[in-house]
Image (cartoon, rainbow, N blue to C red):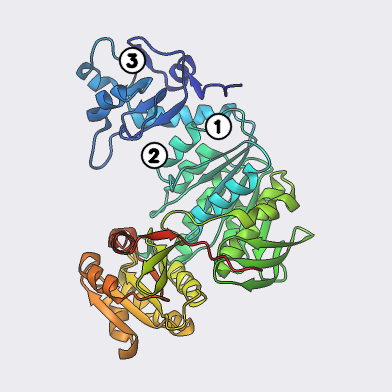
């Protein structure tokens, strides 16, 4: 039995107050803003981005099988008289209108996730956990901004039982309109850390910006907060001021509603004992790192609050895997054996960098292997940037990292603080560091690569994978 279409053309017209142009299909199977990856039967939204105007790619989208294109009235004249179009005043505004219509028709339990670290991994864990118990929709990739959230919401099928959305920001005022669009029954803040400091007066201001997610919480809804985080009390007060009374905490703190009781950290996974809202559970978590284990408490609390079965949810956590660029492991084939590549290249801030170094510190190495960190600049930290980079030295020492390669002007602060024995190499940018990092690897090593997206550390990951083809690492430690 075929699934019903995502949207009928008529429902889209009504939601977006659009006018018809050309012969429209009865319905569309999906929505896209990328003509390169659009699938047959989907609707193409000609969004204007910072670099490209989607209207320039309407013809390509229709040629690739798009069922129709959503375009702005001012550019309608560019297209053939018979082109299947929905015409609106503004395409992004039309997408937002469609997203609101999607939320209005949904009977799903809706969960929204934000936080300085762990948004995407928490969202993906919820996708896995809830998806095992009923039809579940979740944001693709890191679609968490002013166009990603409405696109994700508008893509939500009417029939799903659970829906999970990631909401991000780097300036105050960005989360509130997105939260009010999503209208979650449950809002999770994973943690508040010193990120995007360039745009904030301090960490309290970051906490207040994250707390904007509470403005969208449905009446009677709940928030899930990290009790171990120093901003917990501030976040709680923000929620209470908005009349939210169901405040669920998670952490190792003995007062936590979802409490960590014991943990065994392994190289590629963890064994966790916890009490989730009065229920004792023991489970294997398919990703390494204490930070992942802490966020799994929030996942289980949210799953239980959303009406999922807790035992099945805990069982599903053994199957979660890292998202691309967030801890994916690959075995690299070298002369004499293998090395392990840990790809953390998607993004970085001081908290996630320390967590990644902790994971590297527990990575398995061969008899003559070394733990090697290849680190690029952490961006948007403002005047605190130099000291926060230098401060990574503590995590490098604590986790017995053998060699450190650095690139970027900010990471120079760490490089200068390293002892001579730990210095692998330095370059002004990732491209300059690439050859040094590739030539350093030998069998038995574990190498972790991380930096902010703008640091382009993925180029070094790509170079290693090209030079030493291998396979996704399958070396999970037994627990």
Q: Which residue is mark 2?
A: 147
Residue 386 is left or right of residue 338, and the answer is left
Q: Camera-side residue: 478 or 46? A: 478
Q: Camera-side residue: 462 or 355? A: 462
Residue 289 is left or right of residue 262, and the answer is left
| Disc 3 crowd, CA 10 A, few/some/many (<14, 14-19, 20+) | many
Quadrant of the frame with the C terminus = bottom right
Residue 258 locus on image (x, y percent): 70, 61
Toward the bottom, the furthest residue is 420
**Picture residue at 41% right of the left edge, 71% below the top:** 339
User: Residues at badges 3 and 1 in contact (C-beta under 8 Å)?
Assistant: no
| Disc 2 crowd, CA 10 A, few/some/many (<14, 14-19, 20+) | some
For the residues labelled 2 and 1, the Cα–Cα distance comes to 16 Å
Residue 80: numbered disc? none
Of mark 2 and mark 1, the one earlier in the sequence is: 1
Residue 70 locus on image (x, y percent): 34, 23
Residue 198 locus on image (x, y percent): 33, 63
Q: Residue 386 occupies which quadrant of the picture?
A: bottom left
Q: Secondary structure at mark 2?
A: loop
Of mark 3 and mark 1, the one earlier in the sequence is: 3
Residue 256 visible from this viewpoint: no
Residue 84: numbered disc? 3
């Amino acid at each position: 039995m075929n699934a019903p279409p995502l949207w009928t053309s008529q429902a889209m017209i009504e939601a977006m107050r659009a006018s018809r142009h050309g012969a429209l299909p009865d319905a569309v199977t999906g929505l896209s803003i990328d003509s390169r990856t659009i699938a047959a039967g989907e609707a193409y939204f000609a969004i204007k981005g910072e670099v490209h105007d989607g209207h320039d790619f309407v013809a390509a989208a229709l040629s690739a099988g798009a069922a129709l294109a959503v375009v702005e009235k001012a550019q309608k004249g560019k297209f053939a008289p018979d082109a299947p179009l929905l015409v609106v005043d503004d395409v992004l505004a039309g997408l937002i209108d469609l997203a609101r219509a999607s939320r209005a028709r949904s009977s799903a339990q809706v969960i929204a996730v934000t936080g300085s670290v762990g948004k995407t991994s928490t969202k993906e864990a919820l996708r896995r956990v809830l998806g095992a118990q009923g039809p579940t929709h979740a944001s693709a990739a890191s679609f968490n901004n002013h166009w990603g959230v409405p696109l994700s919401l508008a893509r939500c099928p009417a029939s799903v039982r659970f829906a999970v959305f990631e909401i991000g920001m780097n300036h105050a005022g960005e989360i509130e309109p997105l939260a009010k669009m999503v209208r979650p029954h449950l809002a999770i803040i994973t943690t508040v850390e010193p990120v995007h400091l360039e745009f904030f007066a301090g960490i309290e201001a970051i906490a207040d910006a994250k707390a904007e997610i509470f403005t969208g919480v449905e009446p009677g809804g709940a928030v899930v907060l990290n009790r171990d985080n120093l901003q917990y009390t501030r976040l709680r007060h923000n929620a209470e001021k908005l009349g939210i009374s169901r405040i669920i905490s998670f952490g190792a703190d003995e007062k936590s509603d979802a409490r960590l009781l014991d943990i065994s950290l392994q190289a590629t996974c963890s064994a966790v004992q916890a009490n989730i809202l009065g229920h004792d559970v023991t489970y294997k978590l398919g990703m390494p790192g204490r930070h992942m284990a802490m966020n799994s408490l929030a996942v289980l609390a949210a799953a239980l609050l959303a009406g999922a079965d807790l035992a099945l949810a805990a069982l599903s956590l053994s199957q979660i895997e890292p998202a691309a660029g967030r801890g994916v492991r690959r075995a690299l084939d070298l002369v004499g054996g293998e090395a392990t590549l840990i790809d953390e290249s998607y993004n970085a801030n001081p908290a996630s960098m320390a967590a990644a170094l902790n994971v590297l510190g527990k990575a398995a190495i061969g008899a003559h292997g070394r733990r090697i960190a290849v680190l690029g600049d952490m961006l948007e930290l403002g005047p605190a940037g130099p000291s926060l980079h230098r401060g990574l030295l503590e995590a490098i020492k604590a986790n017995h990292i053998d060699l450190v390669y650095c690139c970027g002007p900010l990471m120079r602060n760490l490089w200068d603080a390293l002892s001579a024995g730990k210095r692998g190499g330095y370059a002004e940018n990732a491209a300059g560091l690439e050859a040094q990092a590739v030539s350093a690897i030998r069998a038995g090593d574990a190498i972790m690569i991380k930096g902010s997206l703008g640091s382009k550390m993925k180029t070094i990951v790509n170079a290693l994978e090209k030079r030493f083809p291998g396979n996704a690492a399958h070396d999970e430690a037994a627990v």
